[in-house]
Amino acid sequence: MPTGPFAGLVALLVFAAVLVFALFLARGNPLAGSPDGDGGRPTVIGYVPYWDQVRAFDVATAHLHLFDEISPVWYAPEPSGGVELADAEHTVVDPAAVAHLRAEGVRVVPTVTNLRSGEWDTETVQSVVRDPDTRRAHIRELVNLAVTEDYDGLDIDYEDLDAADREPFTEFVVDLAAALHAEDKILTVDVHPKTSESGDDGRNQAQDFAAIGAAADQVRLMTYDYSWDTSPPGPVAPADWVEEVVAWTVTQIPAHKVILGIDLLGYDWADGHGETVDHAQVQDLLAEHGSTVNRTDDGTPWFVYHDAGGTRHEVWFEDAESAGAKLELVADYDLGGAFFWRLGGEDAAVWDDEMCHLGCPEQHPR
């Protein structure tokens, strides 16, 4: 230990270093998942759908220590370039919930989506992004929304576009990012999963991963619906496919901007059609029919039952174990974090057992 005239100076420097470190831990990591990639643990994001908002906000409130961002699905584009409620009859913007989340240090980044009555409204997005004047008007309206409501940013979920929309959609993202950044707001963009630039269809080709990744603060990778409501029964997000998507994506987008999508839902298929089921509904079905849960090699659960009319049902779903297998990819590929679609009705063990794949909150507080 130093002695003499330098002892006091050394002690002061040590104290200062300890104080700075303690302040960092106390404040947590305000930049987790931010554009510069500076972070303690990866960013954790939860989606709140307007059609199940009370239950979803209850989950968020019960686990505030886990979440860095919440994205309520509240808004939609208008053909004229304006912004309206996603569903005028059922969407309820909740300023009190926003204020509570922000007071607890959770960023609120609402989603603007072209989902209407269960269908993707491609034409409205095309009318907005393809016309330069309408595109500029839409950007003004979006920025005004973020500023007026004091949101931390906006999440753009414009899906099911065509290959011909690639250039105008890219211009829209680039210009919107610049406009939001000028107001100190963030932009996140949701993208369809693909393993090559062309992808499988027009909706993949409409999204230029490299350009979107260069402009946006986050790119939320929708790594689910490998099987969907009109496909044959199967896993929603098999881990090997998810990893294949991630491995290609990080060749196009900086890894710290990539946010991995974790679906917490499943499908119950019968007669060639699947109905969405959450974990709570799955447990009810298992209790009613006494079915045995099987697991694929990567841990995806599924089971079969027959209803009262004798129709065979095949159910594939997600639980804590299957989610955990995919959450490991966040660390494996040094991703910016993960988002959960969606809060409400999920396997509660996800929050208790699997979050250390994203860095245990008690070790890396927000």
Image: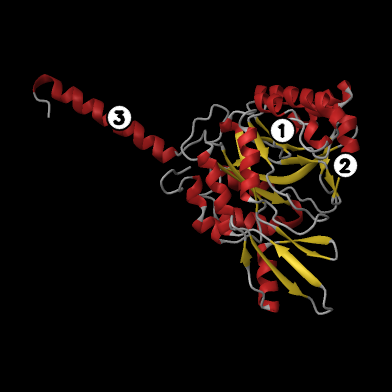
| Image x and y of residue 72, in percent | 70, 46
Amino acid type at circle 3 is Ala
Q: Nearer the viewer, mark 3 or mark 1?
A: 1
305 or 64: nearer the viewer: 305
Q: Is residue 122 above or below residue 3?
A: below
State the residue at coordinates (87%, 38%). Answer: 122
Residue occupied by mark 3: 17
Left or right? Give the position of 184 relative to 201: left
Q: Residue at x 69, y 50 (%)?
A: 48
Residue 263 is situated, as x and y percent measured from the top left of the image, at: 66, 51
Q: Which residue matches tag 2?
A: 121
Which amino acid type is marked by label 1?
Ser
**Residue under label 1:** 196
Task: Tell me the element at label 3.
Answer: helix
| 249 vs 241: above or below | above
Precedes in sequence: disc 2 or disc 3 = 3
Secondary structure beneath disc 1? loop
Q: Nearer the viewer, mark 2 or mark 3?
A: 2
Note whether residue 104 is visible.
Answer: no
The colour mode here is secondary structure
The amino acid pointed to by label 2 is Asp
Q: Position of residue 228 (x, y in %)?
A: 78, 53
- Please name the residue shown 19% across and 22% down the image: 9
How many C-alpha atoms fall within 10 Å of the one at disc 2: few (<14), some, or many (≥20)? some
Where residue 293 sits in the image (x, y, percent)? 63, 69
**Quadrant in which residue 125 is drawn:** top right
Q: Is residue 130 visible?
A: yes
Q: Which mark is residue 252?
A: none
